[in-house]
Amino acid sequence: MDNTILLVFRGDSVIFKKSELINLIKEDWFLSNILQMNFEDKTTPEKLEICEDKNTAMSLIETMRYNSLIVYPKVSLDYLLALAEKWCLPNNVIKMIKNRIVQNINKNDYNLKSINFDEIDTKITFKCINCKGAFKIYENTSESCAFHPYDINYATETRRCCGKPNNSSPCVKSHHVTSIYDLRIYVEMKKELQIQ
């Protein structure tokens, strides 16, 4: 069984480890159940097309991953609640969304009037997809990020990338790299401030 699955959301796609989605929470939920179904050919599909908004679906997945309500930008809380109920998510997730709706809080509203063009590089923090560390654009150098690009070979307890022991210092140094999602937000903010 292949260990990854491509989720396609209205044209946008994301690759996940199947086991990550199955084990995201202990309770049954829509995607987990699909991935555990017995199909005729005894394998789960390598691609699932889901007719939902990617940011809304990813908000729910991240919420379950961190057990804290994560709402991507431009996501309707009403739609988020409807999708959570449709996907049979746990009551604690539904309760978090309802509380946010009642409090009318949207943490993703950023006020660009209070920030200038250059401050985006010095005040906004991004997460590196390689080392998982936080960084600001102006601090990012070719030595900022240190990581192992490949996981552990459990048979030998060494890193697949460099052959060194699991707890060895990282073998690659480079610039921090942000996710495509964060890069889009960064570019959109810069464009918006250029227009003002």
Image (cartoon, rainbow, N blue to C red):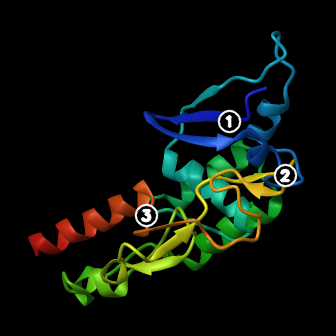
144, 135: nearer the viewer: 144
**Quick one: which residue is furthest to the top in this view?**
40
| Dot 2 alpha-carbon crowd within 10 angstroms: few under 14, some 14 to 19, many 20 or more | few
> Which residue is most to the left?
195
Q: Quadrant of residue 45?
A: top right
Q: Amino acid at mark 3?
A: Thr
Report whether 174 appears left or right of 187.
Answer: right
Task: Determine the secondary structure under disc 2.
Answer: loop
- Looking at marks 2 and 3 on the same chain, the residue that comes earlier in the sequence is marked by 2
Across and down, in percent, residue 178 comes to: 43, 64
Q: Amino acid at mark 2?
A: Thr
Relative height, residue 193 to residue 45 (above, below): below
Contact between marks 2 and 1 (CB within 8 A): the answer is: no
Mark 1, residue position: 4
User: Which of the two labelled residues, at mark 1 and mark 3, occupies the earlier sequence position?
Assistant: 1
In this picture, residue 28 sits left or right of residue 80: right
Say which residue appears at 18% left-offset and 81% top-offset: 117
Q: For mark 3, what is the residue? A: 178
Q: What mark, if any, has residue 156 been given in the picture? A: 2
